[in-house]
Amino acid sequence: MKRTSTVLRLSASDLSIHLACRHLTALDLDVAAGSRVIPAWNSPDAQILRERGIAHENAHVEHLRSSGLTVVSLRDHGSDEGAAAETIVAMQSSADIIVQGAFSESDWLGRADVLRKVSRPSRLGGWSYEAYDCKLARETKAATILQLSLYSHLVEVAQGVLPESMYVVPPGETYEPEEYRVLDYAAYYRYVRSRLRATVKNRLRN
């Protein structure tokens, strides 16, 4: 959740947080409004998990690169808007793999672990992209499906066609992804997204 001079931008993490706890959404809104300060404490366990998650993502990307796929990485691009513009350029150039592709649409920001090109026509040309999320958990959670659903929606806005599938990459030597059909979860995603938006509007109005 980020406040700019004109709008409050929401992210995939905000969807997950709202699913888990509406009160936490309210606290995050207070922080974004400047009426509350985040406690100056970071969980050591959380930091370790973040580092392991990045290592897992990097290993998966190297696995893809070693198979001969072209990789464009936007991980170190600091600006959200700049990264979003570079993501569109990479999609238009038909890169096989885009790492940390960024999207900015209306009041949403999204950053997918991996976008992978598929042979399905879109307004980009004879190809389009689908989203992959690298997770350490052995079982896929609802929050992960929500995040991937948001990424798939943002990819649709960028390329003009909704991805057919979205994927979770669990740990393992083969990096075999778990496939989920985007339309199977679209109604659920729209429900949680609209609920979050309603909560934000009500909170800001008050």
Image (tube, helix red, strand yellow):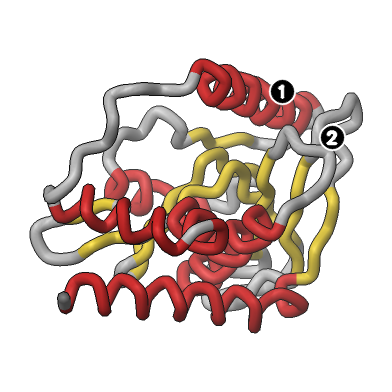
Quadrant containing the C terminus in the rendered view: bottom left
| In this view, 22 is above or below 36 | below
Of 26 and 139, the residue lying toward us: 26
The amino acid marked with disc number 1 is: Ala
How far apart marks 1 and 2 lie (CA) works out to 9 Å
Which of the 4 image quarters holds residue 24? bottom left
Q: Which residue is mark 1?
A: 59
Q: Is residue 119 visible?
A: yes
The amino acid marked with disc number 2 is: Tyr
Q: Is residue 88 visible?
A: no
| In this view, 138 is above or below 196 | above
Left of 201 or right of it: where is 99?
right
Residue at 23% from the left image edge and 62% from the top image edge: 8
Left of 34 or right of it: where is 133?
right
Left of 15 or right of it: where is 78?
left
Of 20 and 113, the residue lying toward us: 20
Which of the 4 image quarters holds residue 69? top right
Q: What secondary structure is marked by label 2?
A: loop
Q: Which residue is mark 2?
A: 175
Residue 148 in percent (x, y) is at: 62, 59
Q: In the displayed orientation, state which residue is furthest to the left.
A: 5
Residue 200 in percent (x, y) is at: 30, 71
Residue 114 in percent (x, y) is at: 62, 44
Q: Mark 1 near mark 2, Cβ–Cβ under 8 Å?
A: yes
Residue 48 in percent (x, y) is at: 58, 18
Of 198 and 80, the residue lying toward us: 198
Residue at 77% from the left image edge and 27% from the top image edge: 63
Q: In the displayed orientation, state which residue is furthest to the front.
A: 23
| In this view, 149 is above or below 162 | above
Q: Label 1: few (<14), some or many (≥20) within 10 Å?
A: some
Q: What secondary structure is marked by label 1?
A: helix
